[in-house]
Image (cartoon, rainbow, N blue to C red):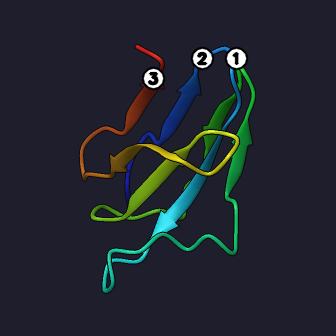
């Protein structure tokens, strides 16, 4: 799996997390894995190394992509 997955939102606006399909490279916009307000943290243990997550703003504009790896997966949004 993707160890130590933690996504911290330090931005003043909320963000959404979506899975990116590894076969198509397209985000699966039909399901939001998390909506993080400022100060929120997302953790989960079912993600695997090689998975990618798209981070969007409130209007679903992409502001970043998280590339999960096999060693450490701590992401601080807004830094």
The structure residue drawn at horizontal position 37% and vertical position 46%, both measured from the top left corner, is 66
Tag 3–tag 1 contact (CB < 8 Å): no
Q: Is residue 10 above or below residue 45?
A: above
| Residue, far bottom | 23
The structure residue drawn at horizontal position 47% and vertical position 62%, both measured from the top left corner, is 47
Classify mark 3: residues with Cα within 10 Å, few (<14), some (14-19) or many (20+): few
Q: CA distance from mark 3 to mark 1?
A: 10 Å
Q: Position of residue 72 (x, y in %)?
A: 30, 38
Callout 2 secondary element: loop
Callout 1 secondary element: loop
Q: Nearer the viewer, residue 45 or 52?
A: 52
* Relative side of 35 to 67, left or right: right
Q: Quadrant of the N terminus?
A: bottom left
Q: Quadrant of the C terminus?
A: top left
Residue identified by numbered label 1: 39
Residue identified by numbered label 3: 76
Tag 2–tag 1 contact (CB < 8 Å): no
Q: Position of residue 8 (x, y in %)?
A: 56, 26
Callout 3 secondary element: strand
Q: Quadrant of residue 50?
A: bottom left
Residue identified by numbered label 2: 11
Classify mark 1: residues with Cα within 10 Å, few (<14), some (14-19) or many (20+): few
> Which label lies toward us, 3 or 2?
2
Which mark is on residue 26?
Answer: none
Q: Earlier in the sequence, mark 3 or mark 1?
A: 1
* Relative side of 49 to 79, left or right: left
The structure residue drawn at horizontal position 25% and vertical position 52%, both measured from the top left corner, is 70
Q: CA distance from mark 3 to mark 2?
A: 9 Å
Q: Earlier in the sequence, mark 2 or mark 1?
A: 2
């Amino acid at each position: 799996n993707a160890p130590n997955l933690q996504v911290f939102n330090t931005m003043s606006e909320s963000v959404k997390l979506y899975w990116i399909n590894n076969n198509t490279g397209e985000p699966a916009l039909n399901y939001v894995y998390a909506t993080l307000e400022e100060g929120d943290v997302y953790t989960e243990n079912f993600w695997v190394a090689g998975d990618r997550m798209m981070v969007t703003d409130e209007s679903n504009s992409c502001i970043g992509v998280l590339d999960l790896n096999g060693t450490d997966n701590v992401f601080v949004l807004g830094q």
